[in-house]
Image (tube, helix red, strand yellow):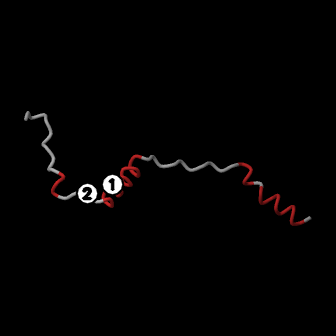
């Protein structure tokens, strides 16, 4: 082994992974690799709803 090679990892035979461990690692990887969603901008037609509702109620 040269100085640039990584050290070998211990064998997985010591403790086999359970389905629960695998699902948890998949969920963690998904959470880390998924970028957060940007907030949706306010729509212009949402602001006028209150004025229209008030005018309709007064009629």
Does residue 34 sit above or below 14 in this rendering?
Answer: above
Depth check: give the residue in front, 21 or 59.
21
Counting every numbered tag in the picture gives 2
Question: Marks 1 and 2: which is nearer the front?
Answer: 2
Q: How far across and down, in percent of the image, does residue 5 sit?
A: 13, 36
**Residue ID at (80%, 59%):** 51
- Residues under labels 1 and 2: Cα distance? 10 Å
Depth check: give the residue in front, 32 or 41.
32
Q: Where, quadrant-wise, is the N terminus in this rendering? A: top left
Q: Which residue is mark 1?
A: 25
Depth check: give the residue in front, 26 or 38.
26
Does residue 5 sit above or below 56 in this rendering?
Answer: above
Task: Indicate which disc, 1 or 2, sits on the residue closer to the N terminus.
Answer: 2
Q: Residue furthest left?
A: 1
Quarter assignment of residue 14? bottom left
Res. 53 mark: none
The secondary structure type at the circle numbered 1 is helix
Q: How far across and down, in percent of the image, does residue 31 sit?
A: 41, 52
Q: Where, quadrant-wise, is the C terminus in this rendering? A: bottom right
17 relative to 5 in the view: left or right: right
Q: Are marks 1 and 2 in contact (CB under 8 Å)?
A: no
Res. 17 mark: 2
The secondary structure type at the circle numbered 2 is loop
Quarter assignment of residue 54? bottom right
């Amino acid at each position: 082994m040269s100085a640039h090679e990584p050290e070998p990892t211990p064998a997985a035979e010591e403790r086999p992974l359970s389905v629960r461990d695998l699902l948890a690692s998949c969920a963690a990887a998904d959470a880390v690799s998924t970028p957060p969603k940007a907030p949706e901008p306010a729509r212009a037609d949402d602001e006028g709803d209150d004025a229209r509702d008030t005018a309709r109620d007064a009629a």
